[in-house]
Image (tube, rainbow, N blue to C red):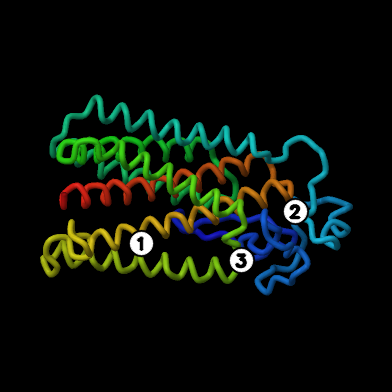
Amino acid sequence: MRSSNPVFSRRGFSRDNGYAGFNAAPQAGGPAVGTQANPYAQQGGNPYAQNPYAQQGQQYGAPPQAPVTTGRMTMDDVVMRSAMTLGTVTVGAVLAWALLPVSSTSYGLAIGSALVAFVLAMVQSFKRKASPALILGYAAFEGVFLGVISEMYNERWSGAPFQAVLGTMAVAGATLLVYKAGWIRVTARYARIGMAIAIAFVVVMAVNLLLVAFGVAGDGGLRSMGPLGAIVGILAILIGAFFLTLDFKQIEDGIAYGAPREEAWLAAFGLTMTLVWIYVEMLRLVAIFSSND
C-alpha cells in the first residue's frame, strides 16, 4: 500500500504486498512475525520475492531471501542514493545561504522553492517508478528553502542552524538504535496509530495557520515562541522519528524481499523528506529555547 501524499508515502515490500510491508519480516532483537497472517494483505504474491525457497524460509520464521541476481536493491544502493539526495539538499542550502542575503526577496524565493519542491514531491509520489531527476530536483529546491530560512534564523539566533543539524543527527541516530535493538516494532497497528496522529497533527497545524493568517490567533497560536510552541515542536519531532521507523522498515523489507535497485531512490526520497521535517522542527525548537534564555 502506498499513499499518494508525499509526506506520508511509505512503500513497503512484503511477501503478500501487505500493509506497507509492516509485519512482513522480523526486526533485529524481536521474535519473528513472518508466519503471522496480515489482515491488510492484498491477494497475489510479492513481485520482488521470486524465491523458490521463500516458503521454507517463512516456515522457520525468517524473511525470504531474494535469489542472488543483479539489479536487486542493497544497503549500499540506499546509502549511495541517500548521500546523493542529502548532498544535493546541502549544496542547495549552502549556495542559497552564501548567495542570497536576508531580505524580503530571499524570503519570497524560499517560499517559491518550497512550493516547487512540494510539487515535484507530489509528482514523484503519483509515479509508479522512481524518477531520479524528480527526486534530485526536489532535493535542490528544498535545499534552497532550507538555506534561506537557516540564514534567517542564524541572523537572530546565532548558531541555531548548527545546533539544529546536531539535533537532527541525534534524533536520527537514536531512532535507528532503538529500531535495530527491537525496542520499536513496526507493525500494521503501530503504523495505523502513528499515521492517525501524524495526519491529525498536520490538520491542526493547517487550521492554526489559517487562524493566524486571519488574525484570530495571535503570536503564532500553537506555533508561538513560548512553552506551548515548544511542546508542539517536540511532538512534531517525535512524529518525525515515527516516520524514520517507517523508512527503516521500508528499507529493511526492500532488501529482504529483493526489491529492484531503482527502489533505493524511493527509500532515499523518504529519508530525505523525513530528515528535512525533523531539521525544520529542530530549528524552531532551538530558536524557542534560545529566546527564553
- Residue 162 found in image quarter: top left
**Mark 2 or 1, nearer chain start:** 2
Residue at left offset 62%, top offset 48%: 251
Image coordinates for residue 114, horizontal then vertical, percent: 31, 45
Q: SS of the residue at dot 1?
A: helix
Left or right: 152 in relation to 96: left
Q: Amino acid at mark 3?
A: Thr
> Nearer the N terminus, badge 3 or badge 1?
3
Q: Answer few, some or many: residues within 10 Å of disc 3's Cα (few below 14, many 20 plus, some between 14 and 19).
A: some
Q: Is 48 in front, or is 226?
A: 226
For label 2, the SS is loop
Left-right relation of 135 to 94: right
Q: Which residue is mark 1?
A: 235
CB under 8 Å between discs 3 and 2: no
**Furthest residue in direction front, as rendered:** 293
Amino acid under label 2? Pro
In three-dimensional space, the C-alpha distance between marks 3 and 1, rounded to whole angstroms, equals: 21 Å
Residue with the mark numbered 3: 187
| Badge 3 element | loop
